[in-house]
Amino acid sequence: LGILGGGQLGRMLIQSGIDFNIPFAVLDPDAHAPCSTLTTFTQGKLTDFDTVMNFGASCDVITIEIENVNTQALKELVRQGKKVFPQPEIIELIQDKRTQKVFYSENNIPTAEFVLVESSADIANKASQFPIVNKLGREGYDGRGVQILRSKGDLSKAFDAPGLLEKLIPFEKEIAVIVARNGQGEVKTFPAVEMVFHPEQNLVEYLFAPADIAAKISSEAERIAITVVEKLKLVGILAVEMFVTKQGDVLVNEIAPRPHNSGHHTIEANITSQYEQHLRAILNMPLGDTSLIVPGAMVNLLGEPGYEGIALYQGIEEVLKLSGVHVHLYGKRITKPFRKMGHVTIVDQDVEQLKKKTHFVKETLKVIA
């Protein structure tokens, strides 16, 4: 099983695959990527046609842990008889937020109102109301490529590249539903989670599972996630990030065709983890039970601002003394401000205790240098 991308998602996919005795190969441009010491590893560009073709030649099945890959090479590998999941056409659609939004619109999937733009000059012409969200079409991730233009004065910092303008939604909560579909069309969702984002970096700081939402909203979120995966006919796992508005409407924000930050807690909190589920889906095995065993939370370990160098984990002993706490470090030697260095899962039957422990972990465990 070949993985394009050797980051922490690939690392956790390999950890899960060991239980199934799956041999892996990984391609990543970073010689010190988190997967580099775990399995057969090739250093190379994920966007280079020949590199991806050469890598894929020795694989039976190929998957991704990042969307920024050469889809033309993946299409050619499919033509040569390789199995590629998620399918290259779907990766291509999701690579561009513009085609993503058009897909929602064409398939009656609820999403924020939007208009496509080609340049900063185009944005100046089309931005009729403020505040408004400006998104890059391609290559935005981990909070990059998304900004809020609050007034005409902000137009000078608008992205000068193809993208979109989106109505700013005054949402009540941000939630995510992870849904899986195998080659036989079997579909299963994980219970919705509630995400809290870093105020400046647009990164998930922590999440709670299950989301504190009405059953009606939870059902609607799961229905939408199933609709998206079935309309795409995707094989694999799909993270569907959504807004819950103050009126109780559920709107799709973005999707990711791979294991996702919003599913890390499933390793400890659910019967089947998102990583095992992805493997089951792409290998066309029966999908696993997604039930929550115990309420869970996840805290992202981000590099502290003002520190760059060899990572030091301050407060890890205090955190490990807590019951129900599990630390996952990603094997990244060098920390930088807001770089994802690991995550901590917290589980507790008592939701109030869970929240207390989560805030303790967030305030105590710091990644410095």
Image (cartoon, rainbow, N blue to C red):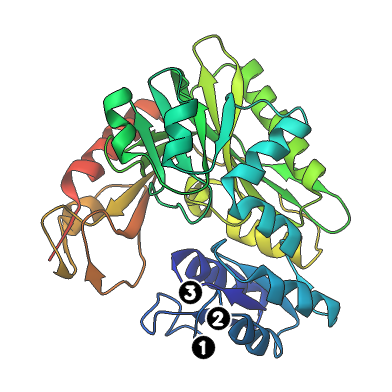
Q: Which residue is drawn at 45% across and 69% down?
A: 7
Residue at the spot 71% in from the left edge and 85% down from the top edge = 59
Taking the image as drawn, is residue 211 in sight? no
Left or right: residue 314 compared with residue 205: left
Residue contact between numbered discs 1 and 2, judged by CB atoms under 8 Å: yes
For the point 59% across and 51% down, which residue is it? 96
Q: Name the residue under label 3.
A: 6
Mark 3 element type: loop
Q: How crowded is mark 3: few (under 14 residues within 10 Å), some or many (20 or more)?
A: many
Q: Which amino acid does label 2 sit on?
A: Val
Q: Residue furthest top?
A: 247
Res. 368 mark: none
Q: Which of marks 1 and 3 is nearer the N terminus?
A: 3
Residue 294 or 316: which is nearer the viewer?
Answer: 316
Q: In this view, does 249 lie above or below 19?
A: above
The residue tagged with tag 1: helix, strand or loop?
Answer: strand
Residue hosting label 1: 42
- Front residue of 251 and 123: 123
Quarter that holds the C terminus: bottom left
Residue picked out by circle 2: 26
Q: State the image quarter where residue 184 is shown.
A: bottom right
Give the Cα distance between marks 2 and 3: 6 Å
Figure check: 130 above or below 275: above
First in sequence: mark 2 vs mark 3: 3
* Residue extending furthest toward the right: 184
Q: Where is residue 222 in the image (x, y as percent from the top left)?
A: 68, 31
Which residue is painted at 54% across and 81% down in the image? 27
Q: In this view, does 334 lie to the left or right of 121?
A: left
Q: Where is residue 302 in the image (x, y as percent from the top left)?
A: 27, 53
Please say whether residue 58 is visible from this viewpoint: yes
What amino acid is found at the position of numbered circle 3 in the picture?
Gly
